[in-house]
Image (cartoon, helix red, strand yellow):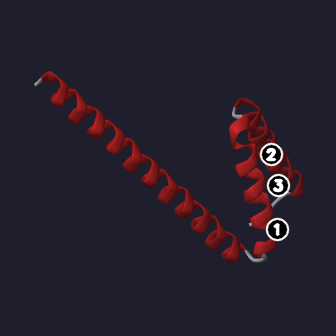
Amino acid sequence: MIIDKSDLFGNIKKAVDARNKFLEEHPELKDFQKEIEKEMRNAGSYENRAVVLKAMMDKRMLELKQNLLNLQKIVNDSTADLSRSKK
């Protein structure tokens, strides 16, 4: 299969433009994008890039899990407080 370089660069440009538009709509993610770009510069091979991305996603998932557990505790504590105040 022969890949036309103009198609390849056109697709890359479309992807970068879409990412930039997304970041404009979600500026809270710009720092995370900078972190991704920094890690990717140091990753080297495609295999290493995949490993780095997985590690970054795993880290974010653990942070999300911890935040959900904290939220669950707040809800449970609030529910318990409401139950006690009704007695």
* Mark with earlier residue (3, 2): 3
* Mark with earlier residue (1, 3): 3
User: Which is closer to the viewer, label 1 or label 3?
Assistant: 1
Q: Could you say which is closer to the camera, residue 16 or residue 78? A: 78
Are there few (<14), some (14-19), or many (20+) residues within 10 Å of tag 3?
few
The residue at which mark 1 appears reads as 41
Left or right: residue 34 compared with residue 47: right
* Mark 1 residue type: Arg
* Mark 3 residue type: Leu
The residue at which mark 3 appears reads as 8
Residue 10, x across and y down, in percent? 85, 47
Left or right: residue 57 compared with residue 14: left
Q: Quadrant of the N terminus?
A: bottom right
The residue at which mark 2 appears reads as 16
SS label for mark 3: helix
* Mark 2 residue type: Val
Distance CA(mark 3)–CA(mark 2): 12 Å
- Please identify the quarter of the rendering in which residue 65 is found: bottom left
- Residue 65 visible in the picture: yes
SS label for mark 2: helix
Residue positioned most to the right: 6
Residue 30, x across and y down, in percent? 75, 44
Mark seen at residue 61: none
Q: Quadrant of the C terminus?
A: top left
Residue at 79% over, 39% down: 20
Q: Could you say which is closer to the camera, residue 45 or residue 8? A: 45
Residue at 44% over, 54% down: 66
- Please identify the quarter of the rendering in which residue 28 is found: top right
Q: Are marks 2 and 1 in contact (CB under 8 Å)?
A: no
